[in-house]
Image: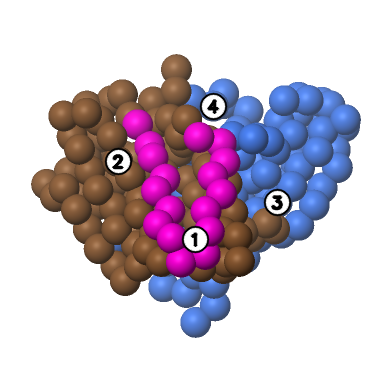
């Protein structure tokens, strides 16, 4: 049972354009969400997070949107740069258990073309 | 400030054997979580340790066990290895107070033959 789904395994975008990565979840108890970026041979790197009390969070070129009614979040990267090419994972957690036990999606491989 | 380190980088074991993987947390972090990432999948939560006690566990059998030491370094032990245990094992450290920010190490690639 995949509670966090990233339905696009890969995405290619031209440099300078917007990249939109999508993530859906099924568990309504999830109340904290993150995006991680992973380069080959490295561990995932924290990118941006959002709490369920918000519907948008921005950090420089990265914006995460949360639509609780649709159980959907998206990561927008504007403008996209070749260095953004990596695998992006979304992760969700229910903080009511007292432990941030993250459930990860399967990842989307982003390729930014120069 | 040193980041999260893991050892060894790669490991090959035979089915039925036991393995110990090690993790050194980022300086000052008192919480460590372990994840298993199979090929083509996202990381799956194994368990978390806080102040040397297990503080949450995912859907993994008891043959997956862990330890956290007073210096907050950690071990993941897997007994009776199975072929499906072949994966990248990641540890992530954090402060309990800001547990949502987890910093990952580069992982240990385990191959079971």
What stretch of residues is rendered in magenta?
A8-24
Find out whether residue A14 is within the magenta segment: yes
Q: Quadrant of the N terminus of chain A?
A: top left
Chain with brown colouring: A
Q: Colour of chain B?
A: blue
Q: With A31 as the anchor, is A22 left or right in this view?
A: right
Badge number at residue B108: 3
Along the polypeptide, which appears first: circle 2 or circle 1? 1
Q: Secondary structure at mark 1?
A: strand
C-alpha gap between disc 2 and disc 4: 28 Å
Q: If the image is split into quadrants, where does the C terminus of chain A sit?
A: bottom right
Q: Nearer the viewer, mark 2 or mark 1?
A: 2
Q: Which residue is mark 4?
A: B60
Tag 4 or tag 3, which sits nearer the N-term? 4
Q: Name the residue at 54% across, 27% down.
A: B60
Residue B109 place in picture, x, y as percent: 74, 47
Q: Residue at x 61, y 39 (%)?
A: B37
- As measured in the structure, the alpha-carbon distance from the residue carrying label 2 to the one carrying label 3 is 30 Å
Is disc 4 on the same chain as disc 3? yes
In the rendered image, the vertical position of residue A92 relative to residue B32, given as above or below: above
> Would you place residue A42 above or below residue B87 in this image?
below
Residue A16, how many percent across, how many down? 46, 66
Depth check, front residue: A108 or B54: A108
A110 or B73, which is in the foreground?
A: A110
* Distance between the alpha carbons at the discs numbered 1 and 4: 24 Å
According to the picture, the residue beneath numbered tag 1 turns out to be A45
Disc sitting over residue A58 in the figure: none
The reply to whether discs 1 and 3 touch (Cβ–Cβ < 8 Å) is: no
Percent across and percent down for residue A38 are 56, 55
Viewer can see residue A96: no
Q: Which mark is residue A73?
A: 2
Q: Secondary structure at mark 2?
A: strand
């Amino acid at each position: 049972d995949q509670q966090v789904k990233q339905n696009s395994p890969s995405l290619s975008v031209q440099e300078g354009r917007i990249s939109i990565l999508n993530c859906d979840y099924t568990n309504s108890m999830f109340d904290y969400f993150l995006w991680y970026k992973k380069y080959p041979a490295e561990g995932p790197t924290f990118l941006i997070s959002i709490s369920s009390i918000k519907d948008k969070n921005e950090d420089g070129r990265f914006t995460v949107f949360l639509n609780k009614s649709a159980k959907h979040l998206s990561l927008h990267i504007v403008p996209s740069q070749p260095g953004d090419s990596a695998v992006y994972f979304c992760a969700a957690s229910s903080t009511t258990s007292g432990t941030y036990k993250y459930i990860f999606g399967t990842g989307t491989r982003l390729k930014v073309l120069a | 400030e040193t980041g999260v380190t893991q050892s060894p980088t790669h490991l090959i074991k035979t089915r039925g054997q036991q393995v110990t993987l090690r993790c050194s947390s980022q300086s000052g972090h008192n919480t460590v979580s372990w994840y298993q990432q199979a090929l083509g999948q996202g990381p799956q939560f194994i368990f978390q340790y806080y102040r040397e006690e297990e503080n949450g566990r995912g859907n993994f059998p008891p043959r997956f066990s862990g330890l956290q030491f007073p210096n907050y370094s950690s071990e993941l032990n897997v007994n009776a290895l199975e072929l499906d245990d072949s994966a990248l094992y990641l540890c992530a450290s954090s402060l309990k107070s800001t547990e949502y920010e987890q910093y990952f190490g580069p992982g240990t690639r385990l191959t079971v033959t």
